[in-house]
Amino acid sequence: MSLENNKQLARRFFDCFSSNDVAAGLNLLSDDATWWIAGKPEQLPAAGSHSKKKIARLFQTMAGQLPDGLKMTVKSLIAEGDRVALEVESLGRLQNGRVYNQQYHFLVTIRDEKICAVKEYLDTQHVFSTWFQS
């Protein structure tokens, strides 16, 4: 794929979440895709490396806690080779009333017109205080 096509695929993935279509987003991942989330798994349950099946469960769990969905806004992106780096901001209100307004950096790797690997860097303290703290 061209660099422009890689960028469009990465942007389309986040557009799926903004339109609350998790299934369409998951269809853009290869069957053997991996998703790594920053943080220490013993301190933040979502942190670490996940298979496509495991990340799908995580996304579906998240979607169930966000009655109006999660708006994902791509702020910038650059591509080189098979990788796309994106700065993204999310915004959503959880059922518990808390607002999840996250800043991310994603490194997306593309193979055969599918996303095959994602590295997600984010504010882990905001994740914990919004999603897990009582």
Image (cartoon, helix red, strand yellow):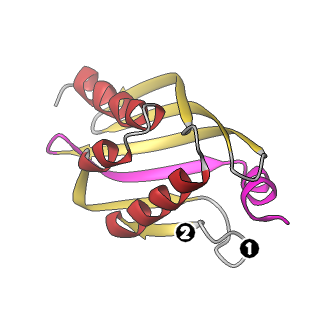
Q: Position of residue 118 (x, y in %)?
A: 42, 51
Q: Toward the viewer: 131 or 104?
A: 131
User: Which residue is depicted at the point 46% across and 43% down?
Assistant: 107
Q: Is residue 25 above or below residue 56?
A: above
Q: Toward the viewer: 26 or 42?
A: 26
Q: Earlier in the sequence, mark 2 or mark 1?
A: 1
Instruction: Report which residue position mark 1 lands on.
Output: 43
Q: Residue furthest right?
A: 134
The type of residue carrying mark 1 is Gln
Q: Is residue 116 magenta?
A: yes
**Quarter the N terminus occupies:** top left
Q: Is residue 125 left or right of residue 93?
A: right
Q: Is residue 113 left or right of residue 49?
A: left
The type of residue carrying mark 2 is Gly
User: Which residue is depicted at the point 55% across and 68% down?
Assistant: 48
Q: Secondary structure at mark 1?
A: loop
Q: Which mark is residue 48?
A: 2
User: Which residue is depicted at the point 77% across and 53% down?
Assistant: 130
